[in-house]
Image: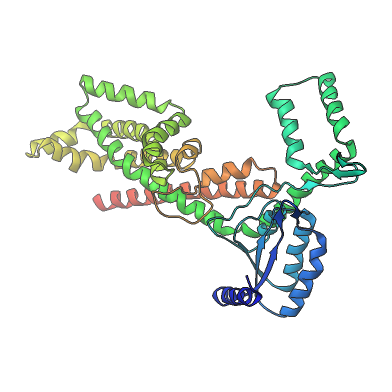
Amino acid sequence: MARAERVRIIEKIQRARKSKLICYLTSDRPNAPAQVQKDVIPLFYEHLAQIGKTSRVDVLICTVGGDTLAAFGLGRLLREFVPWVGVLIPEKCHSAGTLFALGGNEIVMTRLATLSPIDPSLIRPLNPAVELGPGQRQLVPVSVESVIGFKELVSREWDIKGEDSLAQVFKVLAERVHPLALGDVTRARAQIERLARKLLAVHRDDADSINAIVGTLIIVAIAGAIALPLGIGGGVYLAEFGGNRFGGLVRFVADILTGVPSIVIGILAYELVVVRMHRFSALAGGVALAALMLPPIARATEEAVRLVPPDLTDAALALGAPRWRAVSGVVVPAAVGGIVTGGVLAVARAAGETAPLLFTAFGNNFWNVSPTQPMAALPLQIYQYAISPYDDWHAQAWAAALVLIALVLVMSLLARLVTRQRGADRS
């Protein structure tokens, strides 16, 4: 492509993005490979100095990896000049390139674009070497993930234990890779985790929590729309008309479902909804939570209706009301306090469930309110943050747990307020 054509394309991108554009591409040809290295930092500095004061800069990058410190340094350099950085990825942006992309405010990828694990291949003087010819030696890069994979293979797949066995395995590895090179691998891995954590912090804000809060409300609303009518109707039936064998069977099934682990309900919902829809979704999560809510709602409603004095039903029947009218117009309003209590307890239980949502709603890092798509939820966010190795993520897990408790408390107070107001109106 001629230089004039390239300039025209760059100007077109700048107009569309309303920003300045820097292109950084490294060769991936077998005979002429190139990687992200520190010698590119002065070139970036010159370009940024020529661009001058601006609020937005895009970097179009295509690379197979390189020095992670150089990638991190490029990100820090850009932040010294501009407050907003976009990363445009037309094809591949691997390893160190992925680390650089994590530092951008926005990542724009084509359908062919790919990111990868941050796995730098270390090239040090102590690396193993291969003989290419007489007097020609080439150092073999040591992949961080390859060393970690070997460790996992020994400890998990082969299940090698004991000091003597592990010492023998390490001896074999050290004969081929210098121990100091292995030390560099350990240091590089810790460095990658630290740098990736800092760059990921750029993308984490309150929007994640808001997404999870809205997702929780949507999933619980779907579950309530399914479980509340069925549970309340079933409970009224059991209390008023359930003195037969069918009523006994329904009670038995409800009691069994109450003791079923929630993860089993999640697997069942996965088979019945997710597999048939060919995707995870909030709808599947609502179905799973509804199955958990249904038994306690039905049993609480039954007990609440049984506590209503029979005289009220008899009085309604004596006035000529049919049985269904006496139940719906007299018995149910009298038992509304117990019914609401059972419903709130069921909602509180469902709102805090994580296992069913792992198999159904699955979670979503992006804003979504469509019930047919994967959706974030507070229990999933708590689980993901709690198992992370970072203290600040643990703090966010505690904060999400507090928000979840507050949501349940608010729903309970609103339910109590409504029932109390209805009781005052009837009196």
Pick the residue in front: 2 or 206.
2
Query: Residue 308: in sight, yes or no?
Result: no
Q: Please give left or right for residue 36 compared with residue 346 in the image.
A: right
Q: Position of residue 172 (x, y in %)?
A: 84, 27
Query: Which residue is pictured at 59% across the width and 77% down the height?
Result: 8
Give percent across and percent down for residue 160: 75, 21
- Residue 263: x percent and y percent? 48, 31
In-front residue for pair 89/344: 89
Seen at 44% across and 34% down, the residue is 266
Compared with 306, 214 (above or below) is below
The image quarter in which residue 206 lies? bottom right
Classify 374 as above or below 323: below
Residue extending farthest to the right is 135
In depth, the one of 195 and 337 nearer the eye is: 195
Q: Is residue 109 left or right of residue 124?
A: left
Residue 49's image quarter?
A: bottom right
Residue for point 70% across, 58% down: 100
Farthest residue to the left: give it: 320
Can residue 411 be seen at all in this image of the molecule?
Answer: yes
Measuring from the top left, give residue 131's x and y in whole percent: 87, 39
What colour scheme was applied to this rendering of the protein?
A: rainbow
